[in-house]
């Protein structure tokens, strides 16, 4: 058949166009055919939805994205938009498993004939209310107590605090933050008049020198450590000075490492200030306009301060601390001469008899050299729990405190809170309650009859724990926990099952004053309930239902942020709507349009700071921050021929606290923390070989561990972790505490070690 | 119209010839495109040889066809004419096809090839920034990966890896030219950890981290990405936005060099 020239065989341009168009269209439809894998990489763990949340574990408060499938948490990853820039540590990654672990408490239990037996919620709560009422009627309100946690949500700690202080009328409200953060609180409040750090995480991105003391940041705050490393990777001239008795993983990255003896911090910091004075590193503008000096109750002059410091020469301190004078001088030089120095510290500073003094001396080093209030220059205390700051410190859920930095001892503060809580004047007791160690000691004596323990494990964590187990046995102990059994539920008369993490909704405040929201995404297992619901029911049954009128997480938050407006903590502007949208906000944040405050006390940045000066330390009546004259005290529990070694306790990266949550996680079960680090020199003398079973004996008790020979510890020092319930290191630790903060000194006691003869 | 008639014995019509010539020209252009130039530090790489071979074949083929058809047509015997046409229309174009395919397959491994889409600029700029703390930048400045840095970490080992890689590249290109991608761009699916593990697993640094042992199975199954702890590999969406707002020609002031 003859072809027309304008109708050739093959493809016309139009047909070609159609063909290409159809191909692209089909390619786009490939995922719909179920052959998506052929077209695009697929996630290994399929999810239905991703939801914004926050990690369950430490005080860093990393943002997470939580993947749900069929109403279960199946995957968790870091939130790119949060401060952690999408990173999580192994514990954060483990959050996808924690809800479904073995050992969740599923129903209420009542102890009958020495055994915990399943009971209904009604029976359990009836018994709790009856016991509490009876104790209050017979022995007065101070015979009952609440022992809370830096892991409860802010709404829960706030409600418990209000119920006990303004309802029942006792200040016996304390909790585990006393064991970890109390010295940081007294350090900040005695220096600035207000608790909580002045700086924020973003300062890490601007610092030129990091002074890290009493912190194994790499293992205990790994995500903040990565941020520090990001800074040193970007600016290789950034220096890291590390002060720690152990040569930890963190020490491997330090430019200068000072392995001081535990409990000698005061000498070291005083000696560093000595060098600041000697080398003219003192910021005279700070001294003239923004600082005051104090020793005990007495005001002092700068001249008196200089005379006090004169005693602490680097040479003298070097002997006390077990380091060289040269390293002290170098540390002081690096600290003072950098453009911006940031200090980071945590339990190493806080958990010692001179915890408060150590905290305020680190702050004083910043104040005296002017390394504060600028990007990168700040003294910054790291926190161990997700809500010790927001939930306990800010709400004042401690025996001596009232919300927003108020004190039980101050009549004006009590009146303010009575008015805000709408209770009659005089309802709040003027007597400070029992702090943690004193509370359990009171239970030993029989002074406290009933104790409501929520979300913490004092049966394992108290120092010299055997001493206090008797009291836990004696008192009527109500334990609310997501896990059972624990070392505390062993002694419980009633166990109430609690919801965990995203099984309930709430707000927490992390180490940098950032409030952020945990959404409720899944239902709790069995009959478990949120701690807030349990506290509300307790209030109802104790006849304080009217006082606890806010009953949902949102309503409690609204009440709380409005209470905060009457203080310098003002975060009224952090509304629920903003929390749902944003990756948290840093207080002070007084209005709904305020972006939050990165650096406190700086006029222009901090909405609470007045004037146009460099600083307004509004926590102090004279607007000046206080530098304290603190003395190195003799160490308690000295080492002798009988107890020749120093015992130190701490943590590892993979586990958290008493392992109730991390212990059952499958991927973490291969990580065993039951070992004693001992230097080969000491091991040689004691004829101990790697892996030998050893007994650590102190003046209070013994603990069995396996020897691990390592030069991480110095000769003369041994170390064990506080994690495992299998071997309670706190049977050996000393229950002395800081006289100001009442925080126990877990980091130092004298022990003897011997090989266990089989 | 003798030309057309004779040519018509081989090819159905003139339009097809024009299409074929256009295709050849396109391939020449692709092969010579400076976007895929690979740095060879003054030496001739295999890629250069292939590229120039392809160009020579293409130019030679066109020249041959023009000469055979328009200049020497009458002077050639019929057999020679057919053979030369065969060379000009099939043999040389096949060489061109082979070399250009090879050039494209190899050339698209280069950082410059990835950089040819402007959405990739923030990633490459960050990688080349000696002060950046991202994983990509650290691998780049320390020379841990000597060349084809994007490809090395984004294409899995083995033949399936290559196929996946080319498919991904094709998909990206398709989305890009049709402007049907969502901004900010996201990595699709789970990252293949073997790209990290092939170098890092078993090193002393790897072994001393207990978390690695604890997560070994999860990491091997890609259920947990290495970058979950060690990221971010590239600037995050918000940071990319900041970088994109800067003028594209202007790079960061690089006064400091990091290790």
Image: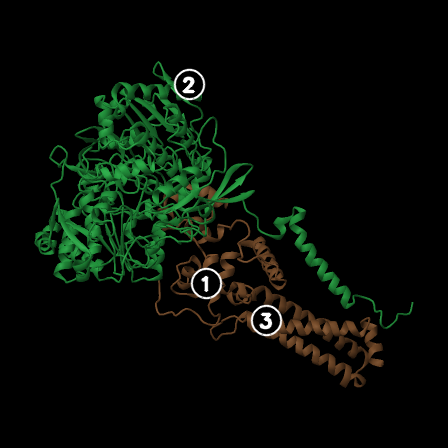
Q: Quadrant of residue A58?
A: top left
- Single out the mark in the foreground, 3 or 2: 2
**Residue B143 in view in this figure:** yes
Q: Is residue A15 left or right of residue A308?
A: right
Q: Which mark is residue A123?
A: 2
Residue A197: image location, x then y, percent: 29, 49
Which residue occupies 59% across, 64% down? B105
SS at badge 1: helix
Q: Which mark is residue B242?
A: 1
**Residue A323 in view in this figure:** no
Q: How many marks?
A: 3
- Single out the mark in the foreground, 1 or 3: 1
Residue A123: image location, x then y, percent: 42, 18
Q: Which chain hosts label 2? A: A
Label 1 to label 2: alpha-carbon separation: 60 Å
**Residue placed most toward the observer, A631 or A165:** A165
- Single out the mark in the foreground, 1 or 2: 2
Asked if the residue under mark 2 is in contact with the one under mark 3, i.e. CB atoms within 8 Å, the reply is no
Q: Is residue B195 left or right of residue A261?
A: right
Q: Quadrant of residue A281?
A: bottom left
Residue of label 3? B50
Residue A88: image location, x then y, percent: 41, 47
Label 3 to label 2: alpha-carbon separation: 85 Å
Q: Quadrant of the N terminus of chain A?
A: bottom right
Query: Which hue belongs to chain A?
Result: green
SS at badge 3: helix
Q: Which chain hosts label 3? A: B
Q: Quadrant of the C terminus of chain A?
A: top left
A635, above or below A492, in the image: below
How many neighbours does mark 3 have within 10 angstroms: few (below 14), some (14-19), or many (20 or more)? many
């Amino acid at each position: 058949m003859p072809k027309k020239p304008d109708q050739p065989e093959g493809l016309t341009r139009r047909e070609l166009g159609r063909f290409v168009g159809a191909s692209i269209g089909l390619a786009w439809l490939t995922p719909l055919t179920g052959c998506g894998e052929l077209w695009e990489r697929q996630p290994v763990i399929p999810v239905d939805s991703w939801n914004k949340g926050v990690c369950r574990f430490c005080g860093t408060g990393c943002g997470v994205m939580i993947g749900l499938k069929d109403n279960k948490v199946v995957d968790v990853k870091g939130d790119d938009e949060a401060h952690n820039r999408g990173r999580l540590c192994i514990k954060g990654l483990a959050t996808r498993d924690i809800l479904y672990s073995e050992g969740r408490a599923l129903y209420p239990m009542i102890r009958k004939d020495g055994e915990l037996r399943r009971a209904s919620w009604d029976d359990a709560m009836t018994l709790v209310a009856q016991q509490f009422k009876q104790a209050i009627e017979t022995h007065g309100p101070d015979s009952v107590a609440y022992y809370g946690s830096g892991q409860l949500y802010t709404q829960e700690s706030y409600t418990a605090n209000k119920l006990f202080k303004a309802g029942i009328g006792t200040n016996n409200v304390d909790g585990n933050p006393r064991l970890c953060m109390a010295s940081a609180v007294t350090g900040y409040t005695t220096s600035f008049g207000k608790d909580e750090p002045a700086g924020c995480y973003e300062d890490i991105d601007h610092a030129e020198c990091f002074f890290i003391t009493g912190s194994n940041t790499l293992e205990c705050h790994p995500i903040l450590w990565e941020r520090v490393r990001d800074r040193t990777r970007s600016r290789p001239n950034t220096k890291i000075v590390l002060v720690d008795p152990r040569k930890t993983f963190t020490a491997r990255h330090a430019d200068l490492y000072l392995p001081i003896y535990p409990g000698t911090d005061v000498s070291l910091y005083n000696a560093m200030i000595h060098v600041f004075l000697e080398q003219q590193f003192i910021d005279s503008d700070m001294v003239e306009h923004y600082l005051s000096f104090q020793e005990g109750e007495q005001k002092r002059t700068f001249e008196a301060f200089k005379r006090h410091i004169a005693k602490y020469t680097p040479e003298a301190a070097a002997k006390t601390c077990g380091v060289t004078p040269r390293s002290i001088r170098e540390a002081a030089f690096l600290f003072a001469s950098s453009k911006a120095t940031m200090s980071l510290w945590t339990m190493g500073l806080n958990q010692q008899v001179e915890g408060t003094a150590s905290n305020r001396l680190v702050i004083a080093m910043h104040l005296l050299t002017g390394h504060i209030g600028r990007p990168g220059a700040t003294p910054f205390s790291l926190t161990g729990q997700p809500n010790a700051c927001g939930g306990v410190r800010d709400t004042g859920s401690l025996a001596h405190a009232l919300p927003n930095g108020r004190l039980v001892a101050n009549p004006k503060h009590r009146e303010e809170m009575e008015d805000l809580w709408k209770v009659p004047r005089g309802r709040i007791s003027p007597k400070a309650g029992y702090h943690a160690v004193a509370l359990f000691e009171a239970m030993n004596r029989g002074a406290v009859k009933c104790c409501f323990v929520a979300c913490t494990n004092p049966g394992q964590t108290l120092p010299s724990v055997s001493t206090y187990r008797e009291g836990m046995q004696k008192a009527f102990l109500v334990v609310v926990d997501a896990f059972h059994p624990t070392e505390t539920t062993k002694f419980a008369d009633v166990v109430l099952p609690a919801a965990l993490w995203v099984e309930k909704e709430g707000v927490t405040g992390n180490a940098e004053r950032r409030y952020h929201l945990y959404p409720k995404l899944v239902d709790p297992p069995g009959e478990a309930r949120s701690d807030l619901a349990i506290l509300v029911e307790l209030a109802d049954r104790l006849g304080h239902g009217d006082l606890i009128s806010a009953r949902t997480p949102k309503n409690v938050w609204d009440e709380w942020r409005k209470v905060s407006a009457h203080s310098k903590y003002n975060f009224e502007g952090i509304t629920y709507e903003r929390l749902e949208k944003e990756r948290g906000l840093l207080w002070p944040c007084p209005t709904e349009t305020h972006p939050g405050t990165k650096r406190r006390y700086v006029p222009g940045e901090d909405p609470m700071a007045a004037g146009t000066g460099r600083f307004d330390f509004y926590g102090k009546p004279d607007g000046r921050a206080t530098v304290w004259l603190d003395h190195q005290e003799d160490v308690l529990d000295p080492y002798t021929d009988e107890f020749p070694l120093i015992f130190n306790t701490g943590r590892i990266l993979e586990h958290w606290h008493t392992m109730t949550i991390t212990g059952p996680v499958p991927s973490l079960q291969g990580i065993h923390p039951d070992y004693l680090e001992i230097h080969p020199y000491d091991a040689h003398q004691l004829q101990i070989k790697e892996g030998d079973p050893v007994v650590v004996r102190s003046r209070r008790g013994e603990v069995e561990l396996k020897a691990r020979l390592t030069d991480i510890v110095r000769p003369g020092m041994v170390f064990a972790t506080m994690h495992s319930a299998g071997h309670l290191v706190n049977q050996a630790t000393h229950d002395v505490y800081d006289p100001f903060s009442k925080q126990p000194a877990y980091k130092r006691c004298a022990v003897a070690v011997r090989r266990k003869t089989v | 119209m003798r030309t057309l008639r004779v040519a018509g014995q081989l090819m159905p019509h003139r339009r097809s010839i024009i299409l074929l010539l256009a295709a050849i020209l396109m391939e020449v252009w692709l092969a010579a495109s400076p976007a895929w130039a690979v740095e060879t530090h003054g030496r001739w790489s295999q890629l250069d040889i292939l590229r120039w071979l392809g160009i020579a074949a293409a130019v030679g083929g066109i020249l041959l066809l023009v000469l055979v058809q328009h200049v020497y047509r009458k002077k050639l015997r019929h057999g020679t004419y057919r053979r030369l046409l065969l060379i000009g229309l099939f043999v040389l174009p096949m060489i061109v096809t082979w070399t250009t395919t090879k050039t494209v397959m190899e050339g698209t491994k280069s950082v410059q090839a990835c950089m040819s889409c402007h959405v990739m600029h923030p990633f490459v700029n960050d990688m080349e920034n000696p002060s950046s703390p991202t994983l990509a930048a650290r691998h780049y400045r320390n020379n841990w990966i000597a060349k084809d840095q994007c490809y090395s970490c984004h294409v899995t080992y083995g033949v399936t890896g290559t196929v996946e890689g080319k498919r991904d590249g094709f998909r990206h290109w398709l989305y890009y030219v049709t402007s049907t991608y969502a901004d900010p761009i996201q990595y699709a699916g789970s990252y293949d950890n073997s790209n990290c593990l092939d170098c890092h697993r078993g090193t002393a640094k790897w072994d001393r981290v207990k978390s690695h042992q604890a997560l070994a199975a999860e990491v091997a199954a890609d259920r947990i990405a290495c970058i979950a702890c060690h990221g971010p590999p590239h600037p995050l969406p918000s940071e990319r936005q900041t970088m994109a707002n800067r003028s594209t020609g202007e790079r960061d002031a690089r006064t400091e060099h990091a290790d």
